[in-house]
Amino acid sequence: MSERVRVRFAPSPSGHLHVGGARTALYNWLFARYHGGTFLLRIEDTDADRSTEASVEGILEGLQWLGLDWDEGPYRQAERLSKYREHAERLLRTGKAYRCVCTPEELEGRRKAALAAGRSPRYDGRCRDRRVEPDTPGALRLRVGDVGVTVVEDLIHGGVSFDNAELDDFILVRSDGVPTYNFAVVIDDALLHVTHVIRGDDHLSNTPKQIQLSQALDFPLPRFAHIPMILGPDRTRLSKRHGATSVLAYRDQGYLPEALVNYLVRLGWSHGDQEIFSREELIRHFDIAQVGDTPAIFDQAKLDWLNGHYIRQADPKWLADLVVPFWRQVGVLPEAIEARTAAWTTGGDGTTFAEAVVQAFRDRATTLAELAQDSRFLFRIPIEQDGQAVDRYLRPETLTHLRELTDRLRGLPTWSAATLETLYRAFAAEKGLKLGDVAQPTRVALTGGTVSPPLFVVMELVGRELCLERLAAVVGRTGA
RNA sequence: GGCCCCAUCGUCUAGCCUGGCCUAGGACGCCGCCCUCUCAAGGCGGAAACGCGGGUUCGAAUCCCGCUGGGGCCA
């Protein structure tokens, strides 16, 4: 490829950045980075009724979070209206386009009639040769020949041909002066020197029209790559009713951007058997020609697995910072974290309290939200008791043992996972018990449930003071 | 309705272009075992797919046609 690659992501700001759009952006971004080209961003906001500034901001935020940095833009179509007008006038002058004075109501009526009569609901071309005064209001239509075929040379689908007779004289500019999608896209892609149009499959049917238009305008044709869509579990186009589709919603649930990127890139593309890709590897290996042509179903379970993987791989320091807002969501305030951090002396290897927590809990969390929820009992806040666990593990005979253990814990010289384990093992051996016979009841007393990281790590993290308090509450004694 | 796209385990996919190496490979999920103070993580193992029908060929998941099914675009 001798020409300098220029690609674009062109969302319309009528909603959030959803995972389908994110994948399209990602493929464009990777294509640009692989070729050392330019990735530009364009906001398709000609539809003022449906476009919102909040949506623009959300889209930019989502892209930034995913690490998809753009080199140019964001361009806004709403600020480029004069360019569309200019080229519309040119088409009108050269006779490539004509003014159509049919009203929307008339068109709708004829469309219905055609459908009822079993004919195709295409525009019948009745204004094509009608002579109208230059300033007559009305829509602008492209004059499309009805012989021959238009072939889309697609990087993913190969040559796809459309009968020109199937194309009608589509509208370029509505009677209210607003350019249509197909018109604005062609103008902008040409004016911005876009070399490759990488977009969703749903635009494949629009492409012959855009090719016709490019030719009428004497614009060079970009290359096309129409990537298959992402579907929901019911095999229909992914939408809100399939649950979270917004990129920022995944962020807010505690997914890591690298996990989402890794998941999305593999949805429709593969590189042998490799599942995990660093950003550098993606840039090195991503080949648009390797993108498959079959639609893919979004699978939350696999995303969860990847997210868990990335959480386990992540630098604990970085994770510890990320988890703070999630703790807040489950009622752990920053002051509580600060207090624990200040009191945290064990370890001595320089790891902070939060880092130690992350290391202890990350093997069993798929999201940061889950990690925060699982670890909230470490703080001095009311904890939920699992009634079944209490009934099962905190029976009178075990409480006797816990009472004795409490006394020994109070006198333990050094409060660390290692010394605690030694103490517990010695106690169990002395009483002829299995470790689990005393470990599980202790776990229930401290955490409220039967599931946690290794007990002695948990005890170290909870700290002697709070451990003794919670044990005392359970064995029915006060005063630690 | 017309046109266009698509069709390998439940899901993501390798293989298809350039037929034989496919007893169809990997991953997620699921099931089992190991590890073990619980749950995970990790390790090991298992069940699980070429939509159907015709061709072409010595031979087809791979090429061709049809059907069926799904998706999309036209409003």
Image (tube, coloured by chain):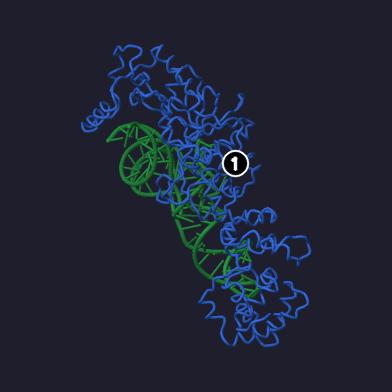
Chain colours: A blue, B green
Task: Identify the residue at horizontal 58%, vertical 65% (top origin).
Answer: A374
Q: Position of residue B56 (x, y in %)?
A: 40, 38
SS at badge 1: helix
Q: Quick one: quadrant of the C terminus of chain A? A: bottom right
Q: Residue tagged by mark 1?
A: A64
Query: Picture quarter containing residue B42?
Result: bottom right
Question: Identity of the amino acid at label 1?
Answer: Gln
Residue lying at 62% horizontally and 82% vertically, measured from the top left: A437
* In the image: residue A70, left or right of residue B19: right
- Side (left or right) of A391 relative to A351: left
Residue at image position (56%, 50%) is A251
Residue A152: name its quadrant.
top left
Instruction: Give how far across and how far down residue A404 sits, in percent.
Output: 68, 86
Indicate whether A353 appears above or below B16: below
Q: Nearer the viewer, residue A28 or A181?
A: A181
Residue A97 position, x and y percent, is: 38, 17
Q: Reply above or below: A32 against A102.
A: below
The answer to which image quadrant residue A463 occupies is: bottom right
Drawn side of residue A191 relative to residue A163, left or right? right
Give the letter of the chain under mark 1. A
Front residue of A156/A440: it is: A440
The N terminus of chain A: image quadrant: top right
Q: Residues within 10 Å of mark 1 (few under 14, many from 20)?
A: few
Residue A313 percent across, percent down from the top left: 66, 55
Residue extending furthest toward the left: A117
Depth order, front residue of A238/A461: A461
Q: In this view, does A291 lie above or below A126?
A: below
- In this rendering, the count of numbered labels is 1
